[in-house]
Image: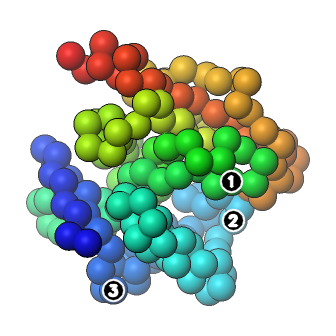
Amino acid sequence: MAEFRHETERLVLRDWRAEDWKPFWEGTNTPAVMRWLGGVADEDKRQGAQDRLLTYKREHGHTFWVVERKDDGAILGFCGLKRSNQGGGPIGMMEVGWRLREDAWGKGYAKEAAQASLELAFTTFGADEVIALTLEGNEGSWGLMKRLGMRRREDLDFPNDDFDKENPVIIVYSIDHGEWKAANG
């Protein structure tokens, strides 16, 4: 399978390389970044995540790709597409997701990468609809979903306590091809 690479104004979304994992985990496996993702991951959880990301690419041709800053080649985190596989959720739907290190927050990188991922979902990977998952308390995440033109889909919310034991519900936003096209010309 050919290596994936997609450039935006400031970023490169690309396939994973062996040397990406160390800086990825150093930047993103922190209490603040992992707050809504079940907490800091131990070695087993990190390896499981790596294996899943590589499996998504093999099985579907897309994954949550590395997000690399063009200016300096820094690994900022990941963003991309996968098939939803969260227990209790809308299994198999195209899902957009992102995770960036703290010093990359508030600079528009997540929006830039997510917009590119949505474009790829609809133009390259044939999606009819794309969802995004988060927790009610993760205002930064669902705020970005709204800025991307996604709408709340309470009908797709589902109980799951993997990430927040006190409020064990994963909430869903979505955008369909027509909505995306209308918003993006």
Residue 98: percent from left, percent from top: 45, 51
Determine whether the residue tagged by mark 3 lies in a helix, strand or loop.
helix
Residue furthest to the right:
166
User: What's under tag 1, amino acid-wise?
Assistant: Gln
Give residue 157's quadrant in the image.
Answer: top right
> Is residue 48 or residue 39 the one in the foreground?
48
Rendered position, 154 above or below 92: above
Q: Quick check: can you spot residue 18?
A: yes
Circle 3 or circle 2, nearest the eye: 3
> In which quadrant of the rendered image does the N terminus lie?
bottom left
Residue 144: percent from left, percent from top: 46, 33
Residue 44: percent from left, percent from top: 65, 85
Q: Which residue is mark 3?
A: 18
Q: Which residue is mark 2?
A: 39
Q: Which residue is mark 1?
A: 86
Q: Determine crowd level at label 1: few under 14, some 14-19, many 20+ residues with C-alpha closer than 10 A.
A: some
Rendered position, 64 above or below 105: below
Residue 91: percent from left, percent from top: 65, 47
Q: Is residue 134 left or right of residue 61?
A: right
Q: Determine crowd level at label 3: few under 14, some 14-19, many 20+ residues with C-alpha closer than 10 A.
A: few
Q: Quick check: can you spot residue 46?
A: no
- Residue at 19% from the left image edge and 61% from the top image edge: 5
User: What's under tag 2, amino acid-wise?
Assistant: Gly
Q: Determine crowd level at label 2: few under 14, some 14-19, many 20+ residues with C-alpha closer than 10 A.
A: some
